[in-house]
Amino acid sequence: QVQLVESGGGSAQAGGSLGLSCTVSGFTHGTYCMGWFRQAPGYEREGVANINSDGKATYADSVKGRFTISQDNAKNTLYLQMNSLKPADSAMYYCAAKRGWVCSFLSNLFEYWGQGTQVTVSS
């Protein structure tokens, strides 16, 4: 079955950097979209960045210019490099995947999810 396992995250000071990784297994080759979502307590889950099988990346306005999504198909791994972190970036971060190359920030379109990894940014 499909399994997504996040790693990385942790704590950082405002202005610092953190990197997240998501290792994917059991996901059939073909067209796909993979994304990072986050959810802070009391808030809805929101899309942060996504990338499709063509390599097209899209970012939420709140992270544009600070976060970079990338993928290493040979390692079946998705990455999120987070720079210039802000306390508002603190949340549980989730990796997600869907079939088909059309990407979206609508979480209900994604079929597979990781367990999440916590990111905490202090001021």
Image (tube, rainbow, N blue to C red):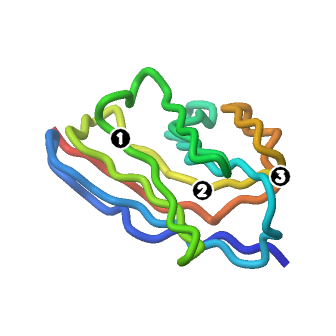
Residue type beneath disc 3: Arg
Q: Give the number of the disc on residue 78.
A: none
Figure quadrant of residue 88: top left
Q: Circle 1 — which element?
A: strand
Q: Residue at x 72, y 55 (%)?
A: 97
Q: Is residue 1 above or below residue 37?
A: below
Choose mark 3 or mark 2, whichever is in front: 3
Label 2 – label 1 distance at C-alpha: 14 Å
What is the three-letter code of the residue carrying label 1?
Answer: Phe
* Residue 33 percent location from the top left of the image: 70, 48
Q: Mark 1 = which residue?
A: 67
Relative image position of residue 27 (x, y in whole percent): 78, 70
22 or 122: which is nearer to us?
A: 22
Q: Residue furthest front?
A: 54
Q: Which residue is mark 3?
A: 99
Q: Which residue is at the front of the view, 90 or 67? A: 67
